């Protein structure tokens, strides 16, 4: 006994000495490095230049969020929360060459970076910054402006340039005025800004002042700055705040190849381009835009009064109480207007009342409109009906009616729509289905927008300050408060089942509702690892015993050293354990697993698509992930594991870095051990060819079509739905459509409730809840719980009884797996998901996304779309480190025939009837008065 105690004391002493030795050696190795780092930090701090030195050594101009104005007086950026922006910083190193790294991100009022909603991360955009001495460099970085919980009028973007030595040679916070959800950018790409100064005065852009109340503008008008770059991002996913672009005399070569591609992408997803034809059409010949133009330019022509007869009948508003008399655009023969002949292309058509004068063409769900006369014409600007013409013909917004209320206040109403005049869906037609589709059942047919409580002077072009907080209490501009139903059936182009976000409007990054919510449900259920099957365990155990006993004994028996078999047994045990662990990790994704679900949206006749992917990353060890894109359109952010509530997380924020290189990448996305992290990424990718719809023949009055899959994607479970112009529903089930193949579209007429029946019969298109519920009800009816023994007796589960028990042990730790243990439907659903993944590790259910698409997205008369799925890896990006277990599935939404434009309509009357002068004159006078006040 005494000897044992002595042995124990010796053992403890030996362990103590070993621990001390380890600590000593660790300190010996770490301390010098730590002290050296401290010394280097002290040296660096001593060498840091002062602010005065930096101001002298580096000249910087105000940060510009594109599209923005580079002029010195336009220091305040206007942008929207929930959108990506390209930030442009102009820097000149005046004393020496400098290299470093640029960082840009949104910060809160206390200077802390704004978190990605619902996560513990903030997005820090970074890129290399090389500053040769004496050269002004335009440095651009993608910046995400997260939405906030509290109502905010302004935001701040922090930007700095830090050298390799840790010196911040540029350090600034730039203010951003926040556009409201119904406000968008109207960009003028024009040669002469003075010729288009009138645009910001149009009442379809900015309503005139009403007493002491200054109505907010619909659009923030942006003019280019002389001798500065074209204020456009090279990434169309940073164009989501732009509703319109007006183009006049800008040469195509002034726009970079990346900007041209972004312009065409933007058009296909709903952007609108207005071209002043006489000065621009000929210049666009040979440009990337040429194939999409509605008309080509013919001979020059002089336009006089008779050329505008039909135009005046349609677009000149009637005089009060004199419906036969109109405010016509008068062009005498003695002073003709210089114009051109418009020759329609195959895709072009003239607008109502604008024969030979204004043509338009559909480009995906967007459009291009071209005029035969210059939009800079002075007589056009002084014409009373110009705001009506812009609103209905060029901007294609709904027709309006002006009136006065019983309180003699001005009343503004849409002619055929009772929704608010500040409905975001009517301000822009840009739509991304993954961003703008609501969760089924949440679409609001009414839209009210109470805006009178906001001090909108910050949005006023001339910073007028006549509206005070005292005025706010007594002013009730009723013309802003319309809240009737939307005209959903009559205006599918603007509505179509989409809904605007309360902060970002339409086109903003969406992690909360619609497709994002559906994807979160799918990957949350599927995320994790699949335990090894009982067959795997038995196979490994049998192999181990075979090696340990008979083979081990036989080997040493043959060499005459049987006694060595005992010594080899521990070595075989260790080798067997390592092998089994290695094989188990490969079988179950012990190290990492990846579950990914996506939506690919393809505009009509276009070979590029918008891919949105949601990924759940499970890891058994803490891992930092990186996602790198092959092109510069890729965007990625952490994805909240549950719908963001906006509440601040009780954790310190970690940065994730969005690096701009040849292709964008997100790095330093940390997933803790034994947990699941989620990513949301999007990019615009080339599919190698379009899904081409073509007419083959006509039988009687019915057109026949065929579909050619020219893309590189193999489509599974494919079908086409079509709604005739008369409103009848038709369906064609294709099944598989391989890349490069062609299939005839043999439609059958069906009722609306049966439109998607073939998809719902396929397991992949059934939601998890739907599959589980059908399975449960078929066995147990409407019972809420069943005993484990009953569950294991189900024919489908009986062969997998051991796996079911293993899943339940993981799901219900500490519970005894007795036969009378009650299992609820929700618990069964988790087990069912794991079994489903074990059957096919490369397939995820698309039911949640399919249900969201078919329940929320409307099919308008004349519209045709394809819905399919693919298991191909179509995203052009690489996730590092790679997962050992991957599940991937993508639903494909292809618009074969886009939503037809609604009828372009003229206003019922004119605002001048109630103002006594034109809105242009009134706003110009306000500008002059404001400038006089400034001079005093």
Image (tube, grey):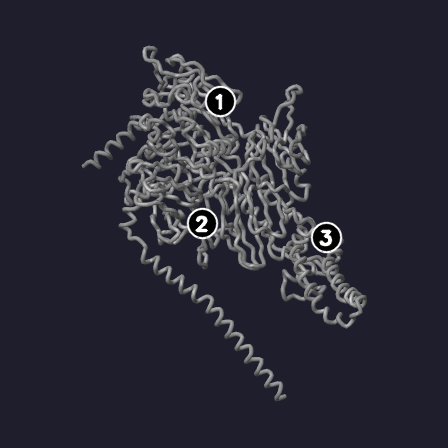
- The quarter of the picture where the N terminus appears is bottom right
Q: Secondary structure at mark 2?
A: strand
SS assignment at label 3: helix
Q: Label 1, on which residue?
A: 294
Up the image or down, 549 lies above or below 864; here it is below
Q: Earlier in the sequence, mark 1 or mark 2?
A: 2
Residue 398, percent across and down?
A: 44, 29
CA gap between label 1 and label 3 equals 61 Å
Residue lying at the far top in this picture: please name it. Answer: 334
Give the residue at the far bottom of this rendering: 2
Residues tagged 1 and 2 counted as in contact (Cβ below 8 A): no
Of marks 3 and 2, the one in the foreground: 2
Q: Mark 1 and 3 residues: CB-CB less than 8 Å, in contact?
A: no
Q: How far apart are the alpha carbons under marks 3 and 2?
A: 49 Å
Q: Label 3: which residue?
A: 779
Judge whether 35 appears above or below 244 on screen: below
Rendered residue at 78%/67% (across/down): 556
Residue 354 location, quadrant:
top left
Tag 2 residue: 123
């Amino acid at each position: 006994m005494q000897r044992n105690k002595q042995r124990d004391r010796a053992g403890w002493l030996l362990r103590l000495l070993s621990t001390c030795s380890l600590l000593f050696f660790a300190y010996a190795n770490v301390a010098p490095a730590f002290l050296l780092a401290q010394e280097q930090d002290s040296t660096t701090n001593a060498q840091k230049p002062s602010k005065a030195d930096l101001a002298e050594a580096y000249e910087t101009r105000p940060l510009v969020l594109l599209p923005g104005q580079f002029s010195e007086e336009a220091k305040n950026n206007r942008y929207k929360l929930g959108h990506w922006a390209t930030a442009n910083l102009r820097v000149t190193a005046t004393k020496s060459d400098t290299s470093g790294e640029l960082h840009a991100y949104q910060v809160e009022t206390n200077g802390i970076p704004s978190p990605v909603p619902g996560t513990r991360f903030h997005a820090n955009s970074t890129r290399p910054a090389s500053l040769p001495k004496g050269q002004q460099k335009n440095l651009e970085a993608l910046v995400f402006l997260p939405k906030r919980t509290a109502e905010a009028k302004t935001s701040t973007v922090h930007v700095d340039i830090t050298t390799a030595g840790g010196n911040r040679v540029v350090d600034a916070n730039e203010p951003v005025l926040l556009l409201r959800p119904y406000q968008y950018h109207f960009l003028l790409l024009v040669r002469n800004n003075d010729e288009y100064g009138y645009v910001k005065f149009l009442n379809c852009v900015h309503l005139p002042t009403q007493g002491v109340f200054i109505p907010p503008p619909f659009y923030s008008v942006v003019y280019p700055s002389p001798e500065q770059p074209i204020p456009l991002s090279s990434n169309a996913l940073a164009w989501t705040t732009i509703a319109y672009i007006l183009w006049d005399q800008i040469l195509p070569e002034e726009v970079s190849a990346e900007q041209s591609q972004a312009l065409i992408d933007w058009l296909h997803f709903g952007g609108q381009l207005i071209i002043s034809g006489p000065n621009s059409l000929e210049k666009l010949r040979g440009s990337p835009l040429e194939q999409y133009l509605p008309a080509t330019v013919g001979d020059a022509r002089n336009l006089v009064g008779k050329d505008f007869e039909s135009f005046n009948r349609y677009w000149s508003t009637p005089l009060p109480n004199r419906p036969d008399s109109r405010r016509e655009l008068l062009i005498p023969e003695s002073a003709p207007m210089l114009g051109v002949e418009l020759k329609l292309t195959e895709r072009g058509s003239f607008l109502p009342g604008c024969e030979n004068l204004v043509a338009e063409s559909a480009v995906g769900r967007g459009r291009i409109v071209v005029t035969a006369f210059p939009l800079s014409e002075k007589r056009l600007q002084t014409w009373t009906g110009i705001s009506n013409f812009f609103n209905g013909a060029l901007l294609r917004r709904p027709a309006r009616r002006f009136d006065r209320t019983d309180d003699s206040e001005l009343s503004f109403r849409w002619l055929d729509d009772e929704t608010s005049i500040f409905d975001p869906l009517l301000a822009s037609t840009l739509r991304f289905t993954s961003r703008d589709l609501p969760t089924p059942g949440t679409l609001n047919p009414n839209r009210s927008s109470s805006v009178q409580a906001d001090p909108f002077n910050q949005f006023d072009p001339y910073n007028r300050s006549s509206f005070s907080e005292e005025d706010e209490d007594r002013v009730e501009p009723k013309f802003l408060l319309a809240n009737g139903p939307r005209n959903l059936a009559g205006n599918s182009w603007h509505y179509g089942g989409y809904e605007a976000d309360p902060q970002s409007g339409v086109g903003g990054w969406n992690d909360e509702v619609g497709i994002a919510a559906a994807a979160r449900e799918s990957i949350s259920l599927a995320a994790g690892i699949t335990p090894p099957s009982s067959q795997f365990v038995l196979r490994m155990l049998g192999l181990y015993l075979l090696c340990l006993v008979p083979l081990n004994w036989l080997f040493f028996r043959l060499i005459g050293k049987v006694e060595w078999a005992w010594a080899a047994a521990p070595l075989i045990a260790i080798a067997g354990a390592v092998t089994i662990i290695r094989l188990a990790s490969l079988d179950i994704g012990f190290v990492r697993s990846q579950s990914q679900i996506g939506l690919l949206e393809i505009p009509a006749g276009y070979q590029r698509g918008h891919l949105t992917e949601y990924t759940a990353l499970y890891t058994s060890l803490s891992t930092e992930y990186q996602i790198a894109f092959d092109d510069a359109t890729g965007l990625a952010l952490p994805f909240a594991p549950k719908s963001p509530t906006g509440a601040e997380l009780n954790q310190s924020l970690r940065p994730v870095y969005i690096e701009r290189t040849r292709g964008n990448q997100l790095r330093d996305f940390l997933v803790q051990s034994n947990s699941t992290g989620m990513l949301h990424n999007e990019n615009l990718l080339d599919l190698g060819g379009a899904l081409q719809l073509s007419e083959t023949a006509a039988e009687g009055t019915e057109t026949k079509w065929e579909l050619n899959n020219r893309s590189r994607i193999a489509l599974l479970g494919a079908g086409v739905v079509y709604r005739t112009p008369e409103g009848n529903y038709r369906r064609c089930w294709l099944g598989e459509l391989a890349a490069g193949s062609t299939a005839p579209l043999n439609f059958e007429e069906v009722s609306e409730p049966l439109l998607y029946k073939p998809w719902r019969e396929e397991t992949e298109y059934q939601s998890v809840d739907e599959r589980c519920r059908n399975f449960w009800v078929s066995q147990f009816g409407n019972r809420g719980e069943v005993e484990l023994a009953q569950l294991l007796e189900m024919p489908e589960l009986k062969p997998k009884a051991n796996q079911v028990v293993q899943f339940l042990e993981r799901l219900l730790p500490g519970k005894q797996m007795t036969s009378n243990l009650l299992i609820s439907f929700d618990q069964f659903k988790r087990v069912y998901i794991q079994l489903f993944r074990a059957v096919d590790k490369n397939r995820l259910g698309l039911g949640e996304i399919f249900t969201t698409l078919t329940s929320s997205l409307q099919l308008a008369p004349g519209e045709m779309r394809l819905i399919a799925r693919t298991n191909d890896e179509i995203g052009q990006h690489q996730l590092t480190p790679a997962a050992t277990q991957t599940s991937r599935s993508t639903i494909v939404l292809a618009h074969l025939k886009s939503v037809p434009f609604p009828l372009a309509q003229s206003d019922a009357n004119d605002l001048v009837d109630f103002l006594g002068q034109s809105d242009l004159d009134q706003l110009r006078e306000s500008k002059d008065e404001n400038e006089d006040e400034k001079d005093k």
